[in-house]
Amino acid sequence: MQTLGRSPWSNDANASDDFLDPLFQRFFEHLSLPNLLRKSDYHELAAFVEADDLDGEVVDVLDMIRDTAGAASPRK
């Protein structure tokens, strides 16, 4: 982001669009592989971070997703 003249800490920065998408695109290009990590998969990254290091907002959102999925009932 610094090369784009932007701060990752600014209020208008979007971590997934402005940082993670370009990061993983360049990472997989470096490996000569297709980008195997899309925005819909970013939740899987939480498993690689210590629970105490996760931002509270991330924990809250993942908990809401878990609770909603657990309360869902399949269509008949």
Image (cartoon, helix red, strand yellow):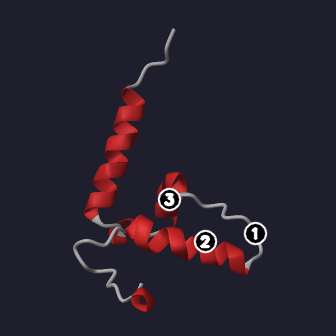
Going from the N terminus, do you reach mark 2 or mark 3 first? 2
Looking at the image, which residue is at 53% across and 73% down? Answer: 22
Q: Is residue 30 above or below residue 52?
A: below
Mark 2 nearby-residue class (10 Å; few <14, some 14–19, many ≥20): some
Q: Measured from the top left, where is residue 47 in percent x and y?
A: 50, 61
- Which residue corresponds to mark 3? 42
Quadrant where the image shows the N terminus: bottom left
Q: Nearer the viewer, mark 1 or mark 3?
A: 1
SS under mark 3? helix
Q: Nearer the viewer, mark 2 or mark 3?
A: 2
Looking at the image, which residue is at 40% across and 24% down? Answer: 72
Q: Measured from the top left, where is residue 46 in percent x and y?
A: 46, 62
Q: Amino acid at mark 3?
A: Tyr
Please tell me the numbered disc located at residue 70: none
Query: Are the residues at dot 2 and dot 3 in contact (C-beta closer than 8 Å)?
Result: no
Please tell me the numbered disc located at residue 33: 1
The image quarter in which residue 37 lies: bottom right
Q: Amino acid at mark 2?
A: Gln
**Viewer-proximal residue among 11 and 45:** 11
Looking at the image, which residue is at 54% across and 54% down? Answer: 41
Identity of the residue furthest to the left in this view:
11
Q: Amino acid at mark 1?
A: Leu
Q: What's the CA distance linking mark 2 and mark 3?
A: 13 Å
- Which residue corresponds to mark 2? 25
Q: Measured from the top left, where is residue 29 in percent x and y?
A: 70, 76
The image quarter in which residue 56 lies: bottom left
Looking at the image, which residue is at 44% across and 74% down? Answer: 19
Q: Measured from the top left, where is residue 62 in percent x and y?
A: 37, 50
Q: What's the CA distance linking mark 2 and mark 1?
A: 9 Å
Count the numbered circles shown: 3
